[in-house]
Image (cartoon, rainbow, N blue to C red):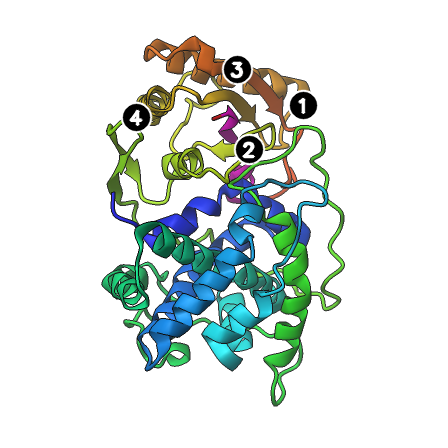
Amino acid sequence: MSFNILDAVKGYLTPQLLGQAASYLGESDSGISKAVSGLVPAALTGIINKAEAPGGASTIMDLAQKALGSGILGNLASGFTQGGGGIPDAGPSLLSGIFGDKVGHIANTIAGWAGIKGSSVASLLGSIAPLALGLLGKHASDSGLSASGLVSMLSSQKSNILSSLPGGLSLGSLFGGSEAPRGAAAPVHHDEPKKSGGWLMPLLLGVAAVALLLYLVKGCGGHKEESHEMAPVTTDTVATAPAATPAPVTAAKSTLKLKLADGTEVDVYEGGFESALVNCLNDATCVAGKDKWFDFDDVNFEVGSAKLTEASMRQIGNIATILKAYPKAKIKIGGYTDKTGDAAVNKKLSQERADAVLAAIKAKGTNEAQLAGAEGYGSEFAKVAATASDEERKVDRRMAVQLREK
């Protein structure tokens, strides 16, 4: 399957990882997810525009090799471990090399649209842009691409990347008008009172916060069973009034063929659960273990029960096919609920649902040696308050796969 940089970046940014980022940055999960939906295509557009500028091919190749050499891909894949590293020394220069003095403006524009702090967006950009460059460096190295070959590949994907910019987010003025019209932009959100050079403070705060976020964001996805509580954020001192933001803006789901190690192809949603799991299985630097979790994104149950919906069987079948293609892989199923209702009842229901998913996978003829059981955690790791809206609480109601071995 041909390399798609948009899918490659999204494959690293799993819901679990973004949830951890939200906790560290003091933002809602929905706000972080919405910001990331704009940041990924924005970062890639900035990289492509730089690559297509005079002399840009060699610049992007140098930046990609620098990012790869910094070890960022290994750090992202290593999970949330104490002493696991942090921001690569090259991080600030990578951002400057792509965006110049536009980092603060980009961060504030996306922050206003997503309803979160500009410094939080700058921190996320400080992870996403180096990650994208590192993935490009790895692809160029693995494929023997020259600088011009890398730029040609990027240019061929530019239209797809631009079309993935969410509606209502306009960044054309920041990228020389290269963006196709997407509707009116939301008002710019500032962390400080507007003044000349007002982009500088979010940028400085963002650079300080990048170290914290990259220390956190170092896995293909996951949470630790041993420790789920995160220290409070102290990076930002300026409070931002919570905005009444809608659910994250997402494009209609498109499907693609995902090729597995044995040549089998499965139909998956672009950037979905299966792609993230298979990316990890194919990546030697992505380490399996107790903190490597991937959320199902199309497995659901009838209300108040452990009966899987018919539509869920597509993804159940896909996980069975993936396990067959990767016979060394071993997984465990986890079930979670939100904080509403009785905790004991929630835990019982989550266990029944985890058991139901495991049984459905077994029924597909899966090698039982690859299945390490199922566990219901109830609301033990739920982050959203019981008084929040149903839309906000749905991130806590999920089923997940723990990649124990690969």
Q: CA distance from mark 1 to mark 3?
A: 25 Å
Q: State the residue position of label 4.
A: 314
Q: Select label 1 or label 3 by which is in front.
A: 3
Would you place residue 185 above or below residue 38 in this image?
A: below
Question: What amino acid is at disc 1?
Answer: Ala
Magenta span: 391-405
Determine if residue 199 is in view.
yes
**N-terminal label among 4 and 3:** 4
- Between the residue at mark 4 and the residue at mark 2, the CA separation in whole angstroms equals 23 Å
Taking the image as drawn, is residue 389 in sight? no
Which quarter of the image is occupied by the N terminus?
top left
Where disc 2 sits, the SS reads loop
Chain-order first, disc 4 or disc 2: 2
Q: Are marks 1 and 3 in contact (CB under 8 Å)?
A: no
401 drawn magenta: yes
Q: Which residue position holds label 1?
A: 343
Residue drawn at point x = 69 percent, y = 35 percent: 228
Nearest to N terminus: mark 1 or mark 4: 4
User: What's the mark number on residue 292?
Assistant: 2
Nearer the observer, disc 4 or disc 2?
Answer: 2
- Image point 49% across, 43% down: which residue? 14
Instruction: Please name the residue that numbered disc 3 is placed on.
Output: 372
Label 2 sits on what residue type? Answer: Lys
C-alpha distance separating marks 1 and 2 = 25 Å
